[in-house]
Image (cartoon, rainbow, N blue to C red):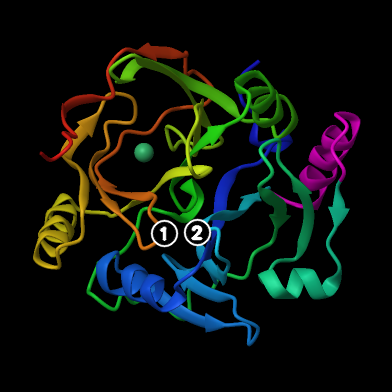
């Protein structure tokens, strides 16, 4: 059965990071990546915009320096009810958000649960959007490719591949885009699954791998290749470690580079990806991460 957004999550709406140095993150998100600060809740949670939505990235104080929240959008209250029922039938404890919890996330409805790798997660519908206050990047990024494709994508290191696939595909309802089977390091073969929930080629990817953090990287997509180049230059100028040089991926055709964030995991900054049609997409398998580039600097 093909992915159907009337019965599943429809975008990676927002992600939260638990970070030990929120000020360093504030600088990084706004001055390097070009997101727009959108204030805080008075209790340590800070919000950042990438488009007309109230927030796409959240930071909270936490020594773990890892992803601490995954927010998945659904079309409306009826879809949310369907997904809740599937989660509960699958043995997942779901907490229905109170009015106060919905207000804190600026959404109309919310349900919270923990995904199989221990990451706090939620599904929501009806987020506050403010087209009357256009996105305005503090470093002049013209905009991000977010909107209906969501904030970007995340790549996780998971405990068990099959359990995680079952959760995201069969309970949240995402569609499989492709597999990547490659030698990540000498002697270690990684098997990565990539999943979609809208035309973005993948909103989530995961591999069963021993890693110090759950989040391997997150990706944001600018609207022009020149802004990827300019951001690459900015990282070089500010001596921000480049983890992977410019390159183009085999699955989503993203032209991107990877740099290190203040929490140690990477951010992929890209543009120019292809999209897929969830109705007609057939699963692919890749043996290489990139068509060209994405080299580890010496
Ligand atoms: Fe990526």
**Image quarter where ligand 1 lies:** top left
Q: Name the foreground residue: 286 vs 11.
A: 286
Asked whether residue 236 is in view, the answer is yes
Cα–Cα span, label 1 and label 2 = 5 Å
Q: Decide: few, some or many residues near mark 1? Use Cα within 10 Å; few <14, some 14-19, many ≥20.
A: many
Circle 2: element type: loop
Q: Picture coordinates of residue 175 (x, y %)?
A: 58, 25
Q: Which mark is residue 160?
A: none
| Residue 1, quarter of the rendered image | top right
The image quadrant that residue 262 belongs to is bottom left
For the C terminus, the quadrant is top left
Residue 76 x/y as whole percent: 74, 51
Residue contact between numbered discs 1 and 2, judged by CB atoms under 8 Å: yes
**What residue is drawn where x is 59% and y is 76%?**
45
Q: Position of residue 238 (x, y in %)?
A: 14, 68
Is 244 inside the magenta-drawn segment?
A: no
**Which residue matches tag 2?**
65
Dot 2 crowding, Cα within 10 Å, few <14, some 14–19, many 20+: many
Query: Residue 10 location in percent, x, y?
Result: 61, 42
Between disc 1 and disc 2, whose residue precedes?
Answer: 2
Q: Residue at x 17, y 61 (%)?
A: 235
Task: Examine the rendered structure and indicate whether residue 148 appears above or below residue 58.
Answer: above
- What's the magenta region? 75-93
- Secondary element at image label 1: loop
Name the dominant secondary structure of the magenta segment.
helix
Q: Residue at (37%, 17%) from the top-left corner? A: 188
> Residue tagged by mark 1?
263
């Amino acid at each position: 059965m093909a992915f159907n957004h009337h019965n599943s999550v429809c975008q990676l709406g927002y992600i939260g990071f638990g970070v030990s140095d929120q000020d360093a993150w504030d600088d990084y998100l706004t001055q390097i990546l070009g997101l727009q600060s959108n204030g805080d809740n008075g209790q340590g949670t800070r919000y950042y915009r990438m488009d007309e939505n109230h927030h796409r990235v959240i930071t909270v104080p936490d020594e773990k320096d890892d992803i601490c929240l995954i927010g998945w959008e659904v079309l409306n209250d009826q879809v949310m009810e369907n997904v809740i029922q599937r989660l509960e039938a699958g043995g997942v404890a779901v907490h229905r958000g109170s009015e106060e919890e919905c207000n804190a996330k600026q959404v109309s409805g919310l349900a919270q649960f923990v995904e199989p790798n221990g990451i706090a997660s939620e599904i929501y519908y009806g987020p506050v959007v403010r087209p009357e206050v256009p996105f305005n990047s503090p470093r002049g990024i013209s905009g991000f490719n977010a909107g209906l494709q969501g904030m970007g994508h995340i790549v996780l290191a998971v405990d068990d591949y099959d359990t995680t696939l079952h959760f995201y595909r069969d309970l949240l309802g995402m569609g499989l885009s492709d597999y990547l089977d490659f030698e990540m390091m000498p002697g270690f073969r990684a098997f990565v699954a990539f999943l979609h929930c809208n035309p973005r080629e993948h909103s989530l990817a995961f591999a069963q791998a021993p890693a110090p953090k759950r989040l391997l990287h997150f990706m944001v997509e600018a609207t022009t290749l020149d802004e990827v180049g300019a951001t690459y230059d900015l990282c070089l100028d500010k001596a921000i470690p480049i983890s992977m040089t410019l390159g183009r991926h085999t699955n989503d055709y993203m032209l991107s580079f990877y740099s290190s964030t203040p929490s140690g995991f990477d951010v992929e900054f890209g543009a120019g990806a292809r999209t897929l049609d969830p109705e007609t997409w057939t699963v692919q398998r890749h043996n290489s991460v990139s068509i060209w580039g994405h080299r580890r600097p010496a």
